[in-house]
Image: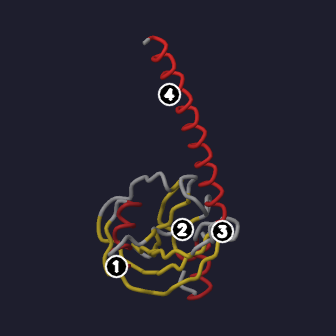
Amino acid sequence: MKEQIKELKKELEEVKEKKTELYYEYKDCVIELDKLKEPRTNVGVAVLVKKDGKYLLGKRSKVNMHGVGTWCSPGGHIEFNESPEDTAKRETFEETGIKIKNVTFIGITNDLFKKEMKHYITIWFSADYASGKVNHNPEYDEIGWFSQGKLPKPLFVCMKNLAHMKQAI
């Protein structure tokens, strides 16, 4: 009986080793497949929030996947079954702690981030500050209100594209 238990333990160890090897082979395949994926285009929303003639901008931190060190307005991805206007309100509140009103469509930009292999279609809105105090968010190293003629540099690609398209800011 002892010999049978010993043999079963040995078989169990071999199965565990094989399972571990298979797991790492699987993980390596997933990583390689991910590299082969075609880049895809995403849809995002951005909001030019205005208060007392100034715009709210944040300097993107390392938490972000792209555009680190550039200045942008609040924005983000549209969630399933969410309208772009609701996305504008939600993202502004999540990123800054403030509420907005008078959300108005102003344009669409086609934003390509070649280095990061990302492509966004950004739906732009303007909005007025409604209430709340701007709070710190890890997505930004700095955040503040800036007048049209004194916007910080460098601007996030989406903002540059909007400025070129509309001469909006």
Task: Look at the numbered discs 1 and 4 and tell me whether their residues touch, using CB distance below 8 Å.
Answer: no
Protein image colouring: secondary structure
Task: Look at the numbered discs 1 and 3 and tell me whether their residues touch, using CB distance below 8 Å.
Answer: no
Q: Nearer the viewer, mark 1 or mark 2?
A: 1
Residue 146 left/right relative to 66: left
Q: Residue 43: image x %, image y %?
A: 49, 76
Circle 3 residues within 10 Å: few <14, some 14–19, many ≥20: few
Q: Tell me where residue 18 sits by quadrant.
A: top right
Amino acid at pointer 3: Met
Tell me how far mark 3 sits from mark 4, CA to CA. Answer: 45 Å
Circle 2 residues within 10 Å: few <14, some 14–19, many ≥20: many
Q: Looking at this view, is 108 or 51 the one in front?
A: 108
Q: Residue 113: image x %, image y %?
A: 65, 71
Q: Which of marks 1 and 4 is nearer the N terminus?
A: 4
Q: Which of marks 3 and 4 is nearer the N terminus?
A: 4
Circle 1 residues within 10 Å: few <14, some 14–19, many ≥20: few
Tell me how far mark 3 sits from mark 2, CA to CA. Answer: 19 Å
Q: Which of marks 3 and 2 is nearer the N terminus?
A: 2
Q: Which of marks 1 and 2 is nearer the N terminus?
A: 2
Residue drawn where x is 42% and y is 73% of the image: 49
Task: Look at the numbered discs 3 and 4 and tell me whether their residues touch, using CB distance below 8 Å.
Answer: no
- Circle 4 SS class: helix
- Circle 1 SS class: loop
Amino acid at pointer 1: Ser
Q: Residue 40: image x %, image y %?
A: 58, 74
Q: Which mark is residue 117?
A: 3
Q: Residue 83 carries which label?
A: 1
Tell me how far mark 1 sits from mark 3, CA to CA. Answer: 26 Å
Tell me how far mark 1 sits from mark 4, CA to CA. Answer: 54 Å
Q: Which of marks 3 and 4 is in front?
A: 4
Query: Label 2, on which residue?
Result: 72
